[in-house]
Image (cartoon, grey):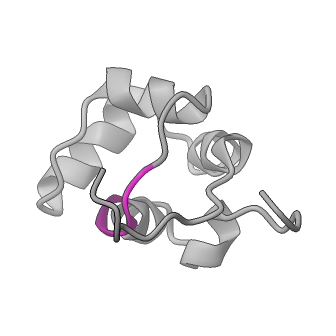
């Protein structure tokens, strides 16, 4: 990741919760993201949900759009995270 890349306080548990609330599987979320122009695999979504990776801002926005939630719903409210 470039030095000047923005790191957002992404909360992997919230992504999983919102995906499940929307009734989507990981492949379903990946397919909807692809339909909106963002290539992401179900495996990568799994790594994001386990906290192994952090999405960059454009992918985070795609998740929020597909899930019908504001971006801040996928961000941690914990200070210092």
Predominant SS of the magenta segment = helix
Q: Is residue 18 above or below residue 27?
A: below
Which image quadrant is residue 36 in? Answer: bottom left
Q: In the displayed structure, does residue 6 sit left or right of residue 51?
A: left
In this rendering, the answer to whether 35 lies above or below 25 is below
Q: Residue at x 42, y 59 (%)?
A: 63
Q: Residue furthest front?
A: 3
Looking at the image, which is closer to me, 8 or 47? 8
Outermost residue, right side? 78
Residue 3 percent coordinates (x, y) = 34, 62
Q: Is residue 66 above or below residue 39?
A: below
Q: Quadrant of the C terminus?
A: bottom right
Q: Residue at x 70, y 44 (%)?
A: 17
| Residue at 54% across, 28% down | 52
Q: Nearer the viewer, residue 39 or 4?
A: 4
Residue 25 can be seen in this image: no
Q: Position of residue 12 (x, y in %)?
A: 64, 42
Please give left or right for residue 43 compared with residue 9 in the image: left
Q: Which residues are magenta?
A: 55-59
Q: Position of residue 2 (x, y in %)?
A: 27, 58
Say if the magenta span includes residue 58.
yes
**Which of the two residues, 60 or 28, is positioned nearer the viewer here?**
60
The answer to whether residue 8 is visible is yes
Percent x, y of residue 49: 58, 33
**Above or below, comparing residue 58 to residue 12 in the picture:** below
At 43% from the left and 70% from the top, the residue drawn is 6
């Amino acid at each position: 990741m470039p030095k000047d890349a923005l790191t957002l306080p992404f909360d992997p548990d919230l992504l999983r919760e919102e995906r499940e609330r929307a009734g989507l599987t990981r492949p379903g979320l990946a397919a909807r993201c692809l339909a909106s122009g963002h290539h992401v695999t179900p495996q990568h979504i799994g790594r994001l949900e386990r906290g192994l990776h952090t999405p960059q801002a454009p992918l985070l926005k795609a998740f929020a759009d597909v899930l019908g939630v504001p971006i801040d719903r996928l961000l941690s409210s914990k200070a210092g995270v």
